[in-house]
Amino acid sequence: MEDYEIVIGLEVHVELLTKTKMFCSCLTEFGAPPNTHVCPVCTGMPGVLPVINKRAVELALKTAIVFNSEISRFCRFARKNYFYPDLPKNYQISQYEEPLAKGGYLEIDGKRIRFKRIHLEEDAGKLLHSETGFISFVDFNRSGIPLLEMVTEPDIGSPEEAEKFLEKLKQILEYLEISDCNMEEGSLRCDANISVRKKGTKELGVKTEVKNMNSFKSVRKALAYESKRQIEILKRGEKIVQETRLWNEKEEITESMRTKEEAHDYRYFPEPDLVPLEINDGWIEEIRKEIKEMPDERKERFKKDYGISDYDANVLISHKGIADYFEECVKLYNNPKVIANWIMSEILAQIKGKVLKKEEIPLKPEYLVDILKLIEENKITVNTGKEILKEVYNTGLSPCEIVEKKNLLQIQDIELIGKFVEEVIRENEKAINDWKKGKQEVISFLVGQVMRKTKGRANPNIVRNILIEYLKSLK
Amino acid sequence: METLKLSIWQLRELYKKKEVKPSEVVMSLIEEIYKKDKEIHSYLYINEKAIEQAKKVDEKIAKSENLRELEGIPISIKDNICTKEIPTTCASKILQNFIPPYDATVIERLKNAGAIIIGKTNMDEFAFGSSTENSAFGPTKNPFDLNRVPGGSSGGSTASVASNLCFASLGSDTGGSIRQPSAFCGVVGMKPTYGRVSRYGLVAFASSLDQIGPITKNVRDNTILLKIISGKDKKDSTSVNIEVPDYEKHLGEEIKNLKIGVPKEYFIEGIDREIKEKIFKVLKLLEKEGAIIEEITLPHTSYGIATYYIIATAEASSNLARFDGVKYGYRSKNYKNLFEMYTKTRGEGFGEEVKRRIILGTYVLSSGYYEAYYLKAQKVRTLIKKDFELAFEKVDVIITPTTPELPFKIGEKKDDPLKMYLSDIFTVNVNLSGLPAINIPIGFSLNKLPIGLQIIGNFFKEEEILKVGYVIEKNIKEEKYE
C-alpha cells in the first residue's frame, strides 16, 4: 500500500436555494406531493422555452467569487442529450464548453484543492418504482431545480481528504446560503474519479468513476475500498479497466456499472433557446457585497467578541445555523459563555447532528434565554432547566407555558427545596431544640419559614416531607 | 358567401356597420370548409366552438360596443402552434391525441385582439418538408391545381387562405416554410426577423431558425396581423425588445430612391423561365416608381442548403427527443422494457422524413463529427449572414424569386429528398441570417399557377419590405397583369 499514492477528483452537485426553478417559475420546495410543482416548461411539453433564473446565476457567482474562480464575462448554456424517463426533454440544459467559472480553489489544512470548473444546470425528476416492478412513475417536482456543478482537479490525495473537502465545502456553501447541502435529501450529490499510481510517477493511472454515495462517510468508505481494489489489481500485475462503478452501501463494495465503451455520447451543442449570458463587473461587485462573513472570520470574531475558547468557537461556527442561533441568543441575554455551553451540551445533543437553519431549530432563541433567566433567578435548578429544554424542544411550547402547566414555578425541585430547608434549620436552632424536646407543632412553623423564604413557591408537601426526613436524621 | 372573399380590414368594416354578423360568417365558413376542404385538405381540425365565440361578438356588435382589432375574425393556425384545449398534432401520429394545456404566446395575443381560431391546418410532419406531403394525415392539395402540391411546410395554412377558407393564417418558417407555400398558393406570407415574434408555444423544429409569421390574402392584412403577434415575450429569451411599429401606417409610402439589391446568385441556371421573366417585369415596374435597382453579390449563397440541413437537423434531433411515449402523445402498445418502449414508440410514431432528419441530426452532433459538420456549418452560417450585412450597407431591400420553380406535382419529388430540399434554395439563407422576408404574389404562369417574389429586409425592418410589397401588389392589381 505504501508504495502507491491515491489521486482523487470530485464532481459535486448542489441544489441551489432559489425560490423557483432554473428555467420556469415553479417552486423548488422539497417534499411536496408528486407532480404538484410542475408546469409545461419543467415537464417538457411541446413548444415550451426556458428562461434563465437570475437568482440562480447570482448564487453561482457568489460561489465563484468565494473560491477565487475566474468568472466568464460571457457564457453559454448547452444541451446534454440522453434518453431517460426522469428527463422530460430527453436533454438536460447544462453548460459545456463555456462554463460560468473556471479555476479557483478551496483550502483544507493549508492545502489547495483546485477547481476545474463551476457551472449551472437543471436537475432531473425522480423515478418511483412500484413494488411489483412492472410499473414506474415519474415525479417532476425536482425537474428543473437549479444545480451548481463543481468539478475539482485531481488534487485530493486520500479518502479522508475527500471527506474533509466535502465538509469544508458544505460549511462554506451553507454560509453563503447557497444550498442546504443535505446529502440524504439529495441537495448535495458527489461522484468521484479515482486512480492510483506508484509513488514518484508523474503520469496519472487509469481512473474509475465512483457513483451512488449518499453520505460523506460513504464517500470516504467507497474511495477507501476503491483505492484498495485498484492497488491490489496493480500488485497482481493486472490492468485497471476504465469504467463507472457504483458504491453498494450494504455490501460496502464498488461494482461495475458500465465500461468506457458503453459510455454515452451526449452530443453537446449550444442551447439555441437561450441567449448567451453576459456578466459584467458591476453585477459581480453587487454580488460580492452580498457575501457576508465566512466561517474562519466568524470564528476569530467569536473568540474576540465573546471571549469563548478556540474549541467552543470552532464548534459553534461549524454550521451557520448554529452560529446564527448563538448570536441571536447573545443579543437577548448577554452571557455568551453560558449560552455556548448550553448550545454545545444540550441543543446539539437534541439536533443529533442534523444541521438546520437558525429558524428551523425547534427551540427559539428567546426560549433558551427564558430558561437561562429562570435559572439565574433561582426559580428553577439547572436540571429542571434541562428538562424544560427537552420539553420545549419536543412540544414547541414556551418555557413559561411548560412551567405553568407543570406547576414548576411552585418549586418541586427536591434539591432546591433541600437547600432552603438546610438554611431554615441552620437559622432556627431554637425551634430544632424544641422539636427534639417533642414539640410537634414546630414542623408547621419550619414549613412556614421555608415557604416565606421561597416566597410561597415551594410545594408545602415536599417541604414538609423533606423537613421530617431531615429532623428524623437528627435523632 | 361573397363575404368569405373579403380581407380582414373589409370584414372589420362590415362588422362595424352591422352589415354582417360574425356568427353568420363563422357558420358559412365552417360549411364551406366541410364542402370545399374534402378536396383540398387544408384543415386537420375544425373548431366548432368558434360559433359560440362568434355569437358573443354578435352581442357586442348589437350593443354597439367597441370592437378589438381582430374581433370576430376567423383565423386558421398551423398545427404546430399550441392551442389550449384544441388538438395540436404537428401532423404526426406521435402527437395525434395531444391537446396542449396552454396557448402559445401568439395565440394569446390573437385571442386578446378578439380573433376566432377557426381550425388547425395541415403541414409536413413537424414542419419537415416543402410540399405538405409528409403529413401523417394525408397531403394538402394546391387550390389552383389539385394535382399539385401547395408547397410546405405551412401548405395547409397557405391553401386555406388561398381558397378563402379563413381570413388569415399563422404559419411557421424555418427554411422557407411560410414563403415557399405562399408562393405556390399565391398569398402574402411573411417570415419576420428572428426574435420579432415569440416562439413560445411553437413546437420547435430548429430553435435558432424557427419564426412564426402571418399568411394573408394581401399586404394590408399582413401588417395588421404582424403588429398583433410581434414584440418581446418574457417567456421567449430569444425574442427581442425592440419597439413594434404600426406597420399599416407605412403602407402607401413612396419608394422613390429606395435601393433595391438583386443578387446575381439567385438567377442561376435551372430557375424557371417564367418566374425569372415575371420578376424582371416587377423590377422594371419598381424602377418606374423611382426605386434604384442594383445588382449585388451574396457570394456564399450556394452553401446555404448544406449548411441549413446540418444546423436544422442537429437542433431538430434534440428538439424531437421529448416525444418518447413517457409523458404525452403516442406510446407503442407492444414493448417489453424501457428501451423497447422508446424505440417502438418513436419507430411507429414518426414518419419517414422525420426519422431521416433525426438520424442526420444525431450524426452531425456525434463526437468525432461535431467539428466537421456542426461547427463548420456554424462558421459558414456566419459567412452567409455577413454577405447580407455587407449588402445591406448598400441597399435597403433585396428582391429574389421565392422559389426556383412552379408548384410541382404531388408525388413528383417524394422519393428524392435531395431534390425536395432544393425547393428551399432561395429561402433558407434568410433563416440562417435571421432576416425578415416576405412572399408577394406577382401573377400566374401560362398554366395558371401562382408565382411569388421574395423581398428580404434588414433586421427588424419589416415595414420596409411591407411597404415595397404593397407597391408591387397595388401595381399588379391595377395593371391587371393576367
Image (cartoon, coloured by chain):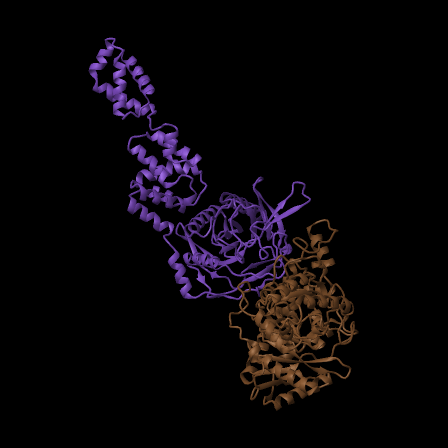
Chain colours: A purple, B brown
Along the line of sight, which residue is nearer the eye, B193 or A71? B193
* Left or right: B1 as drawn, with respect to A181: right
Farthest residue to the left: give it. A430
Q: Residue A318, position in %: x, y?
A: 40, 45
Quadrant where the N terminus of chain B is found in the figure: bottom right
Q: Quadrant of residue A249?
A: top right
Q: As displayed, is residue B118 above or below residue A142? A: below
Q: Residue at x 36, y 34 (%)?
A: A400
Along the line of sight, which residue is nearer the eye, B167 or A389? B167
* Left or right: B42 as drawn, with respect to B399: right
Farthest residue to the top: give it. A438
Q: As displayed, is residue B474 above or below residue B67? A: below
Along the line of sight, which residue is nearer the eye, B262 or A40? A40
Q: Residue A133, position in %: x, y?
A: 67, 43
Q: As displayed, is residue B209 above or below residue A472? A: below
Q: Residue at x 29, y 25 (%)?
A: A456
Along the line of sight, which residue is nearer the eye, B392 or A342? B392
Quadrant where the C terminus of chain B is found in the figure: bottom right
Q: Quadrant of residue A261?
A: bottom right
Q: Residue A283, position in %: x, y?
A: 42, 63
Q: Residue A222, position in %: x, y?
A: 54, 45
Q: Is residue B368 visible?
A: no
Q: Quadrant of residue A458?
A: top left
Q: Is residue A321 visible?
A: yes
